[in-house]
Image (cartoon, helix red, strand yellow):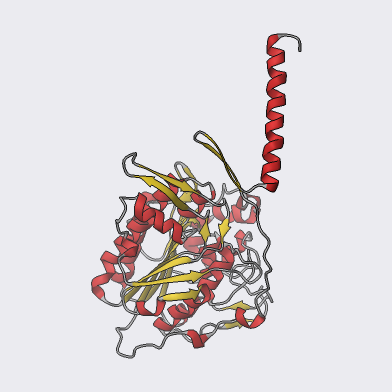
Amino acid sequence: MSSRPGRFLLHASITLGMLAIALLFYSRFGNGDIAFGDLVLRTQKGISYPLEAPSSSILRPHRSSLPAVDSDAPQVSNVVIFIGDGMGVGTVSAASTLLDRPGSVLNMMETSFIGLVRTWAANTLVTDSAASGTALATGFKTDKKIVSVLPDGSVPVSLFEAAQNQGLTTGVITTSGLVDATPACFSAHVPDRDHHDQILEQMLDSGTSVLIGGDWSNNDKAKRNRRYSEMESRAEELGAARGYHVVRNSDALISAPLPILALFPPRTGYAEQHGPPLDVSARHVVELLLQKGNRFLLLIESEVIDGTAHENDIEKTMAGMRELDEAVGEVLALVSARGDTLVLVTADHDTGGLSLVDGDYDDGAATVRWSTREHTLEWVPLFAFGPGAGAFVGVIDNTEVAIRIAQTLNLRPFPHVAESVAN
């Protein structure tokens, strides 16, 4: 190492080693930012605080907290539930500023009926889409990774099942895989969200009239499930045997009649997102359901927000918010004048802990920070439109969302445990 390049490499290695030691020391004992021009190294210590587990009684639904139903209020015939997966309050706040300009109003914000939803799971503060989806679909808390099954193995009735029992048509649209946790919670009951073959089988047998989502044949977890992969390859056969019109590409969707089974390949540039823009799917399905004339309950999920927030990709997260908001606008344009359709816009949990920390109008740039690449405990927003919207204001638990939907549709009994042990 006597040559000049050798000495340079030695000195550089020593300098980098000392810097690494200093940063390690600072990260252990310091708490703040180290700035080198535009480069900011940020350290945060997690501080322990005593935490008690929830009592067993609070995990059960509480009907007494529900607002009284106005007997003179318009009848709710239909409910459309939008779920922006991973859409926390910070995400909506950022979108309302970045998608247009400060002071702009999203379609989802054009209501005075606004709530905040708590999202904790039965076994942990920070939930996942399975536990939160179960709460939104059944009115019960459960553990992470469980799909509409309770921790003791008992099986609660979902909103879809309760609705179908009273003659309503049900449907789900998602940009994620059809068998992903959130849509699965409304049409299946399995002890683990990774049991994709069981989820697909139950969804096909559920009587749900609209099943629109992604083909997860290339998903890392799903493709390890040989039975699921085999079922996906036979989707046309399996769907047709149950009366579905099977769609495998986006162009064919807009001409497909009910009942629909659509399994789309990934979008270009979005490996975990599928199908046409959400407003296209939502408009077609809502028009079909309105033409049918039957009462309906429809779930519409954007997975784009969650997937891109996990990557801390602000541009794609905002693109996901725009897509969701345009779908909300399309549906509101179709149903608002009817006066019989309740539209809810909420989320299962927050992802990323997004916040805007600075913004200079002259420079035309906003500064964004993420607190994590995972989920957080942050409350999520709830925007309500149409008849029954007044029941969804204030701070409520995610279990209460399902219970109040059931109340507006007069679905009884709900919440309700149907079976003692999951299959």
In screen coordinates, is 153 left or right of 74?
A: right
Q: Of all residues shown, which one is farthest toward the top? A: 3
In screen coordinates, is 367 left or right of 279?
A: right
Question: 84 and 55: which one is in front?
Answer: 55
Judge whether 17 appears above or below 311 on screen. Answer: above
Q: Of all residues shown, which one is farthest toward the left? A: 337
Question: 382 and 20: which one is in front?
Answer: 20
Quadrant location of the N terminus in the rendered image:
top right
Could you say where residue 223 lies in the image, as x and y percent from the top left?
62, 50
Residue 376 occupies quadrant: bottom right
Question: 156 and 1: which one is in front?
Answer: 1
Residue 174 in view in this figure:
no
What residue is at 63 percent from the left and 65 percent from the top? 144
Could you say where residue 261 lies in the image, as x and y percent from the top left?
45, 60
What residue is at 49 percent from the left and 35 percent from the top? 38
Could you say where residue 29 lies in the image, as x and y percent from the top left?
69, 47
Residue 34 occupies quadrant: top right
In screen coordinates, is 421 left or right of 62?
A: right
What residue is at 61 percent from the left and 77 percent from the top? 155
Judge whether 63 appears above or below 43 on screen. Answer: below
Residue 181 in view in this figure:
yes
Could you say where residue 291 lies in the image, as x and y percent from the top left?
29, 70
Q: Of all residues shown, which one is farthest toward the right? A: 1
Q: How many marks?
A: 0
